[in-house]
Structures are given as structure tokens and as C-alpha cells.
Image: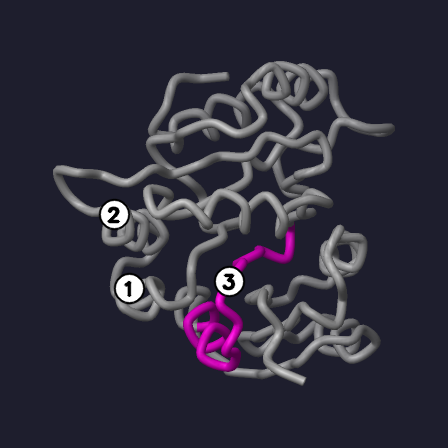
Amino acid sequence: MGAPSAAIVIPTLNSAGTLTACLDAVAGLDWPREDLDLIVVDGGSRDDTLSLCRSHSVRLFVRAGRDAAYRRNFGAGQTDAALLLFVSPDCLVPRDFVRAAQRHLSLAQVAAVGVRGLPPHGSGSSWVQRTWAARGLTRVPDARARSLSGRMLAVRRSEFVAAGGFPENFGLLADRELLRRLAGGAERRHLIALTRADGLRLTVGRGLRDFYRAQRTLDEPPI
């Protein structure tokens, strides 16, 4: 049997609070599990992260003291899958993430596909989170974007390698620099953002201050 066609790389560090929900969302993907390489790279967790990983069908690597960019790059180097999907442990991927990413990345003019992570908006969420999510869901489900987050991001493995992966000396801007390299210069290729009700970032705050802080980090108009 050949290598899986898609791989999900999750960089963890003391992520026990959200990791089970993250892995459950991955398990619910509309994609054959045997065709998915699930890789977790941990940065030296001291909570229950490692035991949670071992209770799921993941390939686990521990690289203590390394940042998320390094862990993502290391995980990408452990697979031959043509499609790389990077997921943060505080995020729930939408069920169609792999299929949608594969469909868009079959077009040469698309450089990367990401998910707009909505805040939790079910039972127990705040009115700010519910309003934020409702407004976010008015967006076009698949639309061009000026920027994407590395929290839920899909790229072609060949181009990821050619671009040098996430630049490890860029800190919190590593994902933006990677996207700049992938999208190119004057003839910029497209970045596609997916908006899905089930694409969540669990650690989004509950108040108005959290909402405005998040908007300032996006290179696009507020939702």
C-alpha cells in the first residue's frame, strides 16, 4: 500500500484541555482514515497531552523545547503525503476540510487553503461568541482572502518543501511569511478561506475585547 494522500500535522504543548475534541473532529472527517497520516509533534508537555495522544491512533513525536513552527516542519518531514494540513490543537476542523482543500488545490492558481476559525457558538457560549459566529457565517463559504491563519491550513507538500516550510526565525509571523512565499510576487496566486459552522477555534475569548483583538490580527475587513 502506498503513502496516504493527505497528512494532518498537529503541534502540541500542554494541550490536554482541547486535544481530545480536536482529535475527535479529525476522526469525523469525511475522508478515509486509511488514506490519512495523522501526526502529532509535542514540545515537551507536562500535562496529559501525551497520554491522550497514545489513546488515539496518531504517530507521536516529542521534540521538547521547540516552537510550533519547528514542530510543524518536523511533522511535515515525517510523511510523503502530497497534501499537508496543519491543525492547531485548540481547533476543530470542519468535516469537509480535506476534500475542500484538495478540490481547491487541484487548481494551479490556488496557493493555500485555510479555515476561518469561528468561536464556539453552541450551548454555554457567550452572546458575543454567538453573534460573532452568526456574522462570520454570512461570508461566502469558499472565498479568496488576503491572509490565512496557520491554525487550520492546507498546502501542497512539494511547494511547502520548496518554500522552506514555516520560517522558524519569524516567530508568530511564520505562517504569514510562508503564505507570502507560496503566493508569489506580482502575479500573486489565490489564498482560499473556508467558512464552516463546524470549523471552530475553541480558545477564542467570550467578550467584546476578545472580538476586537482578533479583528486587528486579520488583514481583512471585520466580519
Residue 151 is covered by the magenta coloring: no
Q: How crowded is mark 3: few (under 14 residues within 10 Å), some or many (20 or more)?
A: many
Which residue is farthest left? Answer: 186
Kindly identify which residue carries mark 1: 167
> In terms of sequence position, does the residue under pointer 2 or pointer 1 come before the other?
1
Which residue is farthest right? Answer: 123
Amino acid bearing label 2: Arg
Cα separation between marks 2 and 1: 11 Å
Q: Nearer the viewer, residue 196 or 5?
A: 5
Closer mark to the observer between disc 3 and disc 2: 3
Q: Position of residue 166 (x, y in %)?
A: 34, 63
Secondary structure of the residue carrying tag 3 is strand
Closer mark to the observer between disc 3 and disc 1: 3
47 over 120 or under it: above or below: below
In the displayed structure, does residue 92 sit left or right of residue 172? right
Look at the numbered discs 2 and 1 and tell me whether their residues touch, using CB distance below 8 Å.
Answer: no
Amino acid bearing label 3: Leu
134 over 158 or under it: above or below: above
Secondary structure of the residue carrying tag 1 is loop
Amino acid bearing label 1: Pro
> In terms of sequence position, does the residue under pointer 3 or pointer 2 come before the other?
3
Q: Where is residue 193 in the image (x, y as percent from the top left)?
A: 48, 34
Q: Which residue is drawn at 28% across and 52% down?
A: 182
- Location of residue 58 by image quarter: bottom right
Kindly identify which residue carries mark 2: 180
Q: Residue at x 58, y 68 (%)?
A: 5
Q: Which of 209 and 20 is in front in this view?
A: 20
- Location of residue 198 by image quarter: top right
Question: Which region shows up in magenta?
Answer: 71-90
